Image (spheres, grey):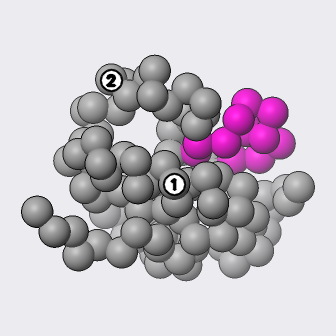
Amino acid sequence: MTNDMALEISCRDAAELAASGEDVVFLDCREADEYAVCRIEGALFVPLSEIADRLEELLPLRDRRIVVYCHHGMRSYRLAVWLRSQGFQQTQSLAGGIDRWAVEVDPSIPRY
């Protein structure tokens, strides 16, 4: 099965998607110390270091659109590739991560 959905989504497109009311889940894959600094409200938090052990928790989301993010978008990109290999075909990585989100979408989010 081929997947025509881009592996990355821009911050602006992800924000528009969320604002449109479309069913989308934001998944924060940063570590707890990063999560303590800032977060996108309403995002599900599962650190990358725990994702393999906690995959069962994500199974109910398998058929939903998931936007996974980290600090700058590198870890989330790798995770999006891995999640797609696990059957989460509608998973995308937030290009630029929460850092770009803070610049382009929500300047109230602290940058680190």
| Closer to the eye: label 2 or 1 | 1
Q: Left or right of 23: which side holds 18?
A: right
Instruction: Categorize mark 1 by other alpha carbons within 10 Å: few (<14), some (14-19), many (20+).
Output: some
Residue sitting at x 31%, y 52%: 84
Nearer to us in this view, 103 or 55: 55
Residue 74 makes an appearance in the image: yes
In the rendering, which numbered label is found on residue 56? 2
Amino acid of disc 2: Glu
Q: From the viewer's perspective, is residue 75 above or below residue 62?
A: below
Which label's residue is closer to the chain start, 2 or 1? 2
Q: CA distance from mark 2 to mark 1?
A: 19 Å
Q: From the viewer's perspective, is residue 14 above or below residue 112?
A: below
Q: Left or right of 24: which side holds 89?
A: left
Amino acid of disc 1: Arg
| Residue denoted by label 1 | 78
Measured from the top left, where is residue 41 in percent x and y?
61, 47
Residue sitting at x 67%, y 42%: 30
Q: Left or right of 48: which side holds 54?
A: left
Tell me the element at label 2: helix
Measured from the top left, where is residue 7 in percent x and y?
40, 69
What residue span does the magenta drawing correspond to? 28-39
Instruction: Categorize mark 2 by other alpha carbons within 10 Å: few (<14), some (14-19), many (20+).
Output: few
Please state, as top left, top right, bottom left or bottom right, where the C terminus lies in the image. Answer: bottom right
